[in-house]
Image (cartoon, rainbow, N blue to C red):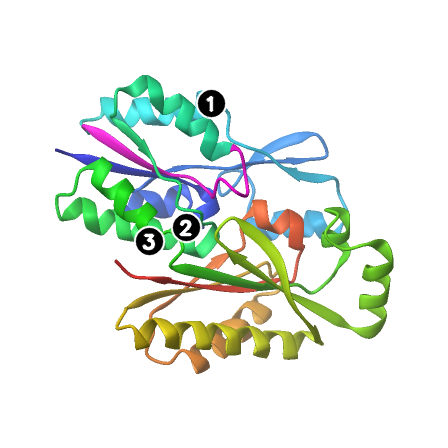
C-alpha cells in the first residue's frame, strides 16, 4: 500500500520544501486589498508582513474545495493508493470540517487528520506521518496515531504590537492603548483548539525570555516521561537580524535539540502582526 502525505501551508511547509520532503502542499490563500495570493507561491512572507506594516487590508481564507480535491485526485492518479491529509486545527478554521465532508466521496482512500495543530506543531505531525508511512502504516492507522497524540504539543507566541489583536477583537481598544503606553507584550498560548492569553510581560526582550522559560518547563515534562520531542521556532520578522537573534536565544536554552525555523504563517500573521515570535514543541512518535 503506497500512502501519500498531504498538508496545507499552515504547517510552515511550502511547495518547494514539500517536493524535497515528499509531501504534497496546498498553499493557503490570503486576500490583500481584494486580491487573492497564495502562501509561498506568489507572495513571500517578507512581502506579506510589509503589507501589514503598511496597514493594507488583509484577511486569511480557506482553500477552495475544488483546490483540495484537485490535489487529492492528482496524488491518487500518480500511483498512490491512499492519502493522509493533515490540515490546520478544526478549532482554528473550518477547512478541516470541509475536508472531512469532501473525503466521504473517496471510499476511505483519503483520511483527514484532525489533530488540533497549526504552524510548527502541524509540521511535526507531517514529520511523524512521513515516518509512519515509511514504516508501512496504512493511512487509517496513521490518522489514528496522529489523533491519539494530538494534544501532546504546545505553542507559545509573543507579539510586538497589540494592533492586530485589537482588530481581531481579542484586545479592547482601551486595553491596546494602555498596553502600548506601558510597553506590555502579551504572551499567547495555543494548546489544542484554542488561542488564549497566557501572561502579560513588560518589554519584548522579557517576553521572549518568559516564553523560553515556559517552553523549557514543558520540554522538561516530556523528557521526564521518557518522551523525545520535536522543537520548532517561528517568527513574523521583516528584519533578518531579529530572526537570527530569536533563533540564537532559542538555541541557547535548547542546547542539543534539532531546532527548525519557519516564518509564522499567513493565517497566524493576520492576527498577531509583524514582529511576533513563537515556539512549539511536540512529542515525537
The secondary structure making up most of the magenta span is: loop
Asked if 60 appears above or below 268 in the picture, the reply is above
Which x, y percent locates residue 204? Answer: 67, 74
Query: Dividing the picture into quarters, in which one does residue 58 lie?
Result: top right
Q: Is residue 159 magenta?
A: no
Q: Is residue 66 left or right of residue 167?
A: left
| Res 218 seen here | yes
Which label sits on residue 65? Answer: 1
Camera-near label (2 vs 3) is: 3
Q: Find numbered disc 3 in the image and state the secondary structure of the residue it sits on.
A: loop
Read off the magenta span.
Answer: 81-94
Q: Which residue is mark 2?
A: 122
Q: Is residue 75 left or right of residue 268?
A: left
Q: Residues within 10 Å of mark 3 (few under 14, many from 20)?
A: some
The answer to which of marks 2 and 3 sits earlier in the sequence is 2
Cα separation between marks 1 and 2: 21 Å
The answer to which of marks 1 and 2 sits earlier in the sequence is 1
Q: Find numbered disc 2 in the image and state the secondary structure of the residue it sits on.
A: helix
145 or 76: which is nearer to us?
145
In contact (CB < 8 Å): disc 2 and disc 3: no
Which x, y percent locates residue 43? Answer: 56, 42
Q: Residues within 10 Å of mark 1 (few under 14, many from 20)?
A: few
Which x, y percent locates residue 36? Answer: 61, 31
Seen at 72% across and 53% down, the residue is 165
Q: Is residue 118 left or right of residue 130?
A: right
Cα separation between marks 2 and 3: 12 Å
Cα separation between marks 1 and 3: 27 Å
Q: Which residue is mark 3?
A: 149
Which x, y percent locates residue 259? Answer: 38, 68
Seen at 45% across and 77% down, the residue is 217
Q: Residues within 10 Å of mark 2 (few under 14, many from 20)?
A: many
The answer to which of marks 1 and 3 sits earlier in the sequence is 1
Amino acid at each position: 500500500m503506497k500512502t501519500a502525505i498531504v498538508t496545507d501551508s499552515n504547517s510552515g511547509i511550502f511547495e518547494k520544501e514539500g517536493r524535497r520532503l515528499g509531501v504534497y502542499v496546498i498553499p493557503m490563500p490570503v486576500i490583500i486589498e481584494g486580491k487573492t495570493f497564495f502562501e509561498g507561491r506568489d507572495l513571500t512572507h517578507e512581502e506579506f508582513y510589509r503589507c501589514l506594516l503598511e496597514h493594507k487590508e488583509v484577511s486569511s481564507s480557506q482553500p477552495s474545495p475544488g483546490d483540495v480535491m484537485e490535489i487529492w485526485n492528482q496524488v491518487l492518479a500518480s500511483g498512490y493508493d491512499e492519502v493522509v491529509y493533515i490540515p490546520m486545527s478544526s478549532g482554528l478554521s473550518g477547512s478541516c470540517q470541509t475536508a472531512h465532508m469532501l473525503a466521504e466521496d473517496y471510499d476511505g482512500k483519503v483520511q483527514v487528520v484532525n489533530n488540533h495543530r497549526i504552524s510548527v506543531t502541524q509540521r511535526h505531525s507531517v514529520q511523524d506521518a512521513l515516518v509512519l508511512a515509511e514504516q508501512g502504516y496504512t493511512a487509517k492507522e496513521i490518522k489514528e496515531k496522529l489523533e491519539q497524540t494530538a494534544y501532546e504539543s504546545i505553542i507559545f507566541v509573543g507579539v510586538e504590537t497589540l494592533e492586530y489583536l485589537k482588530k481581531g477583537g481579542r484586545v479592547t481598544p482601551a486595553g491596546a492603548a494602555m498596553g502600548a503606553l506601558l510597553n506590555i507584550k502579551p504572551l499567547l498560548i495555543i494548546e489544542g483548539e484554542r488561542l488564549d492569553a497566557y501572561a502579560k510581560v513588560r518589554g519584548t526582550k522579557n517576553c521572549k525570555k518568559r516564553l523560553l522559560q515556559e517552553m523549557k518547563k514543558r520540554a522538561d515534562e516530556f523528557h521526564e516521561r521518557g518522551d523525545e520531542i520535536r522543537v520548532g521556532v517561528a517568527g513574523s520578522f521583516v528584519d533578518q537580524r531579529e530572526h537570527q537573534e530569536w533563533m540564537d536565544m532559542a538555541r541557547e536554552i535548547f542546547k542539543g535539540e534539532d531546532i527548525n525555523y519557519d516564518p509564522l504563517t499567513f493565517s497566524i500573521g493576520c492576527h498577531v502582526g509583524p514582529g511576533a515570535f513563537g515556539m512549539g514543541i511536540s512529542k515525537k512518535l
